[in-house]
Image: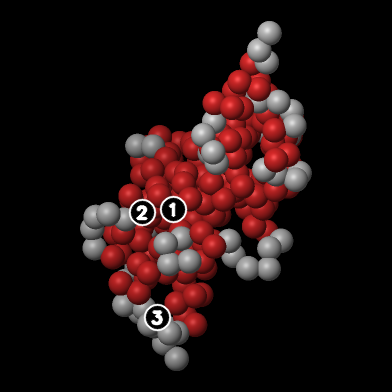
């Protein structure tokens, strides 16, 4: 009798198995949480043998790094789509609201992304490079008038990122439910909060 798992593994085109394992890991992660994620669980979800993931990931840590990488790419895509219209100030606000929405929609993936990045010596490439989510905020601030060579730009970008991260952590609090409902949902609530912060207004250098 043909082994169905061996058949499934052969059905992947060259290079696709790794991608299939990452997608399977995301399914396990978002359905059952980080504690349920293991190479064995991912193999089961992908329909391959328990040994198959070890051809691509030496351990769970490498798998989590790959899942985090996937998450940063997805976040960048969502923020890029949100940035498509409006003046620079509106684009900065829209991309940051999109960030909060991503974190609220994918809480387990979002947590893995930050856990994977927290102890790294440098920001993940998807944050730091010209097409990363962090760079998207920084570039929009340049469009708003920030000096690309000034330290103030980095500080302002970090401030915007921290504001989005903090709101993503807190916007689901039950204490804010009445505000979310009164304002017409989470997106409008997030926009109202962020628009009240100085960093999301027209960028001007600080007075010295």
Q: CA distance from mark 3 to mark 1?
A: 21 Å
Secondary element at image label 1 = helix
From what the image shows, is residue 178 above or below residue 146? above
Q: Coloring scheme of the render?
A: secondary structure
Secondary element at image label 2 = helix
Where residue 148 is drawn, which disc sits there?
A: 3
| Labels 3 & 2 near each other (Cβ < 8 A) | no
User: In front: 29, or 178?
Assistant: 29
- The structure residue drawn at horizontal position 59% and vertical position 31%, both measured from the top left corner, is 24
Which residue is denoted by mark 2 in the rendering?
A: 80
- The structure residue drawn at horizontal position 76% and vertical position 44%, both measured from the top left corner, is 59
List x then y, in percent, for residue 73: 48, 50
Crowding at dot 1, Cα within 10 Å, few <14 / some 14-19 / many 20+, comes out as many
Q: CA distance from mark 3 to mark 2?
A: 20 Å
Q: Earlier in the sequence, mark 3 or mark 1?
A: 1
Secondary element at image label 3 = loop
Where residue 93 is drawn, which disc sits there?
A: none
Q: Earlier in the sequence, mark 3 or mark 2?
A: 2
Where residue 76 is drawn, which disc sits there?
A: 1
Pair 3/1: label in front: 1
Q: Is residue 47 left or right of residue 139?
A: right
Q: Tell me the quarter of the picture where residue 38 sits.
A: top right
User: In front: 56, or 126?
Assistant: 56
- The structure residue drawn at horizontal position 28% and vertical position 65%, both measured from the top left corner, is 88
- The structure residue drawn at horizontal position 49% and vertical position 75%, both measured from the top left corner, is 154
As drawn, the residue found furthest toward the left would be: 86
Crowding at dot 3, Cα within 10 Å, few <14 / some 14-19 / many 20+, comes out as some
| Labels 2 & 1 near each other (Cβ < 8 A) | yes
List x then y, in percent, for residue 82: 33, 50
Q: CA distance from mark 2 to mark 1?
A: 6 Å
List x then y, in percent, for residue 110: 57, 45
């Amino acid at each position: 009798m043909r082994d169905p798992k061996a058949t499934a593994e052969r059905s992947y085109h060259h290079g696709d198995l790794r991608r299939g394992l990452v997608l399977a890991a995301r399914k396990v992660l978002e359905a059952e949480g980080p504690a349920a994620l293991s190479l064995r669980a991912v193999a089961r979800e992908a329909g391959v043998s328990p040994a198959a993931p070890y051809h691509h990931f030496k351990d769970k840590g490498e798998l989590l790094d790959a899942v985090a990488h996937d998450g940063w790419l997805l976040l960048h895509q969502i923020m890029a789509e949100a940035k498509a219209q409006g003046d620079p100030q509106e684009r900065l606000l829209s991309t940051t609201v999109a960030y909060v929405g991503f974190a609220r929609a994918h809480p387990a993936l979002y947590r893995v992304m930050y856990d994977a990045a927290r102890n790294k010596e440098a920001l993940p490439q998807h944050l730091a490079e010209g097409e990363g989510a962090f760079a998207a905020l920084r570039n929009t601030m340049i469009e708003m008038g920030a000096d690309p060579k000034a330290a103030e730009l980095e500080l302002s970008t970090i401030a915007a990122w921290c504001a989005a991260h903090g709101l993503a952590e807190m916007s689901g609090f039950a204490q804010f439910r009445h505000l979310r409902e009164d304002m017409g949902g989470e997106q409008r609530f997030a926009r109202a909060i962020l628009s009240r912060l100085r960093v999301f207004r027209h960028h001007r250098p600080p007075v010295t």
